[in-house]
Amino acid sequence: MKGYIIAFIVSLVAAFTLTPLTIHTVQKLHYGQYIRQDGPQTHLMKRGTPTLGGVAIVLSIILGWGIAALYRYYSRHIIPSWAAVLTLFCMTGFGLIGFIDDFLKVKKKNNLGLTIHAKLIGQFVIATVYAVASLVLPLHSSFHVARFGISWVETPIINLAFAGKTLGLILFIIWVNFLMTAWTNAINLTDGLDGLAAGSSMIAFSGFAVIAFWESYHIIGSHNSGFEYTSSDPQDLALIALAAVAACLGFLWYNTNPAEIFMGDTGSLALGGLFAAMSVNLHIELLAIILGGLFILEVSSDVIQIFSFHVFHKRVFKMAPLHHHFELLGWKETRVVVRFWMIEFGFTLIAVILFYVDWLVKSGQLH
């Protein structure tokens, strides 16, 4: 329990320290945010707001987990797990892609950062390295980081081993690449209003923390009654989830309307990579669709808008993604943000309840 407290407090303190430091540094370098001209006119006043705030989020999560990991090692001789290392690898790798994109935008003073092809190549490399490493790295636990399948909760609905070892690995790499791309884009699209992505991510990772804690308590070999999980080192993942909650909370203090800093692609891509990796490591890839329900709504609205415009030459929404639609309906930005937080809280609560019900059913306590 002390490890959880350490991870949360260290990340929170780090976020409250690093975020204003980032604001000062970015202001000194005159690296302000570019605002799209076709968006709500009220957003034009945000032009020049410091960006690259995702750096503070990423470093805060790493520091929180790192200090907690050191405590666990020196107090209980628990070695940091590959599950945690690979999860943080995804977060940092995608965050680096976002950082390069943000940096190019502020240097050029326009909205043209990395090319689509460059982003896709970088994302493919990171997701593929993670996918392969999660299945082959030697572990000190008795389970691999990832499951060779697609799971609702724990038990694969589709076991990719049916296709054979080589083809199954290729299918798994494709699946992981799809998840990484989908979640990074979903959170990136959500990051369009002050505090929306940070607050929603904070809520979503709270759900991950509950699920990871429950799996660590009911992991095989823990001598608990009822259904037990085969996740690799879920306690380490719970530490990361709590660190992410604290980092988003600390960053949110400076990111609420009117925002003093934006997380940029550095933060949104990092959080998307972290979200995807956590879902795979905890064997809840499909349940995560509900857990991150708000992000799904946001990216779906964008897909629907593009499809409808190109096929029917009509727009379904006044503007996509969804939060801009409600702004153009006359809602104040703060109203949109708070209500979207409430929606994400509802999705997260439903996901946690469904996870618990699944455990009750599998343990024979609910028929």
Image (cartoon, rainbow, N blue to C red):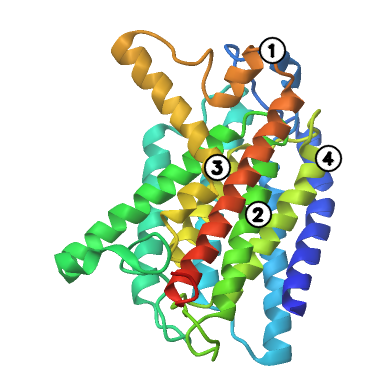
Numbered circle sitting on residue 24: 4
Q: Which is more N-terminal, label 4 or label 1?
A: 4
Q: Is residue 138 left or right of residue 291?
A: left
Q: Which residue is mark 1?
A: 330
Specify the quadrant of the image occupied by residue 109. top right
Give the x, y percent position of residue 45: 76, 16
* Tag nearer the camera, 4 or 2: 2
Question: From where the camera sits, is residue 224 visible?
Answer: yes
* Tag nearer the camera, 1 or 2: 1
Question: From where the camera sits, is residue 124 visible?
Answer: no
Question: Which amino acid type is marked by label 4?
Answer: His
Confirm or deny contact between disc 1 and disc 2 (CB under 8 A).
no
* Tag nearer the camera, 4 or 3: 3
C-alpha span from label 1 to label 3: 31 Å
* Tag nearer the camera, 1 or 3: 1
Numbered circle sitting on residue 35: none
- Image quarter where the N terminus lies is bottom right
**Closer-to-camera residue (40/209):** 209
C-alpha span from label 1 to label 4: 34 Å
Question: Which amino acid type is marked by label 2?
Answer: Val
Q: Is residue 207 left or right of residue 48?
A: left
Question: Which amino acid type is marked by label 1?
Answer: Gly
Q: Residue at x 39, y 70 (%)?
A: 134
> Helix or strand or loop: what does disc 1 sit on?
loop
Confirm or deny contact between disc 1 and disc 4 (CB under 8 A).
no
- Image quarter where the C terminus lies is bottom left
C-alpha span from label 4 to label 2: 18 Å
